[in-house]
Amino acid sequence: MSDKMAPGKEAAGKKLLRALKGEATEGVPIWLMRQAGRYLPEYRKVRAEAGSFLDLCYTPDFAEEVTLQPIRRYGFDASILFSDILVVPDALGQKVAFKEGEGPVLEAITNVAGLAALKPVEAVREHLQPVYEVVKRLRRSLPPETTLIGFAGAPWTVATYVVGGRGSPDQGAAKAWAYRAPDEFQKLIDLLTDATVEHLSAQVEAGAEVLQVFDTWAGSLPELSFERFALQPMKRIRETLKERFPDIPVIAFPRGAGGMAARYFRETGVNGLSLDTGVSALWAREHLQPLGCVQGNLDPLLLVAGGAEMRRQALHILETLGQGPFIFNLGHGIVPQTPPEHVAELVTLVKEWRA
Ligand code: CP3
């Protein structure tokens, strides 16, 4: 299938889109979750200048710049908008702050009375105008071969922060509500589902070519709750987007989905499934790749270590999944202590690899 590819620039961008259409590609496209961020000195410089993290997200000059930084350095096949999944609750009127060394802090909403205080879904497009402005600018400033990815958090993952008021090891606060009063909790999930669809739609209208939905905490849900609060909302998001934008591919990242991954992939109808570090590449080739494009899943800590072990495990993933449809990525985001030269080495290895 590699035959008539135009050489050079044009071909590379299309490569990622072709993989998402379910085609095998000549060479494997690569981008990395959290490819912009604190491991890059040039990011830390802009971050210090911007003031707060949300100011960075909401100031188009800054957000555009930090999105482009990893593209300049490494020439990834895709660029992911620089923003955060928590801009959605921020837009709905739940004040979000990012505290140094503490991560996000929100005023917790734990019942329906708290829900009633939130703004209607229309607030999303209004409040997040600066984010869509960043997307618009990126479509002009990115190299033509680079695919622009927009994103949002999945309703369940965003709900864990909305209800818990911060990150937590067990998502206990959100689970407490979901188990105590599932039909009430469903109202929060429904609101976040609608808000997510609006946020993703606005990104497509501004120029995003692919969408990724992060369900970082999907794996903490037991089967019946996973079905209700992770799988069903993603299915609804995918179906609504399909009606609005039939040609825009969607990647889902149901981290930790384990034995639910195949069913989730099939029933949500997403084009790509992003695999966490714990998913066996051999198993994924047999059970997931026949359903569509898979993406992943090098351990971010191998990227910290670098060297022979990183190369060995990256090659294992390439050899196993590289016949396609496949996008090389990590199993979770790049961590701040990652040496930038290890990223360069990984990108070279993936770009030079051939099936
Ligand atoms: O991937 C990219 O380069 C795009 C930008 C991006 C960020 N956050 C920037 C960010 C994306 C796609 C996210 C997604 C996100 N945000 C998720 C889902 C994916 C995942 O990593 O699991 C989640 C759960 C969040 C919520 C969030 N944002 C947390 C828990 C934190 C604090 C943890 C940390 O790393 O500090 C953030 C802050 C954040 N979002 C940073 C960045 C670069 C670090 C903030 C800083 O620079 O001070």
Image (cartoon, rainbow, N blue to C red):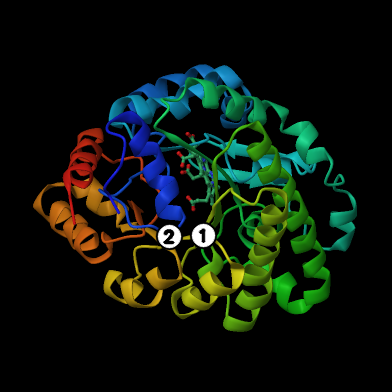
User: Which quadrant is home to the C terminus?
Assistant: bottom left
Q: Which residue is mark 2?
A: 22
State the residue at coordinates (31%, 35%).
6
Decide if residue 258 is in sight here: yes
Badge 1 residue CB within 8 Å of ligand 1: no
Give the image location of residue 95, x and y in percent.
74, 40
Query: Tags 1 and 2 in contact by the CB under 8 Å rule?
Result: yes
Q: Residues within 10 Å of mark 2 (few under 14, many from 20)?
A: some
Give the image location of residue 172, x and y in percent.
62, 68
- Identify which amino acid the numbered label 2 is placed on: Gly
Residue 154's tag is: none
State the residue at coordinates (25%, 39%).
343
Instruction: Indicate the quadrant where residue 84 lies.
Output: top right
Q: Earlier in the sequence, mark 1 or mark 2?
A: 2
Badge 2 residue CB within 8 Å of ligand 1: no
Q: Nearer the viewer, mark 1 or mark 2?
A: 2
Give the image location of residue 260, x and y in percent.
50, 78
Most extreme residue toward the front, as rendered? Answer: 4
State the residue at coordinates (26%, 59%).
322
Element at label 1: loop
Q: Which residue is mark 1?
A: 271
User: Mark 1 and mark 2: span between their CA atoms?
Assistant: 8 Å
**Residue 73 or residue 285, whichever sits in front:** 285
- Identify which amino acid the numbered label 1 is placed on: Asn
Decide if residue 32 is in sight here: no
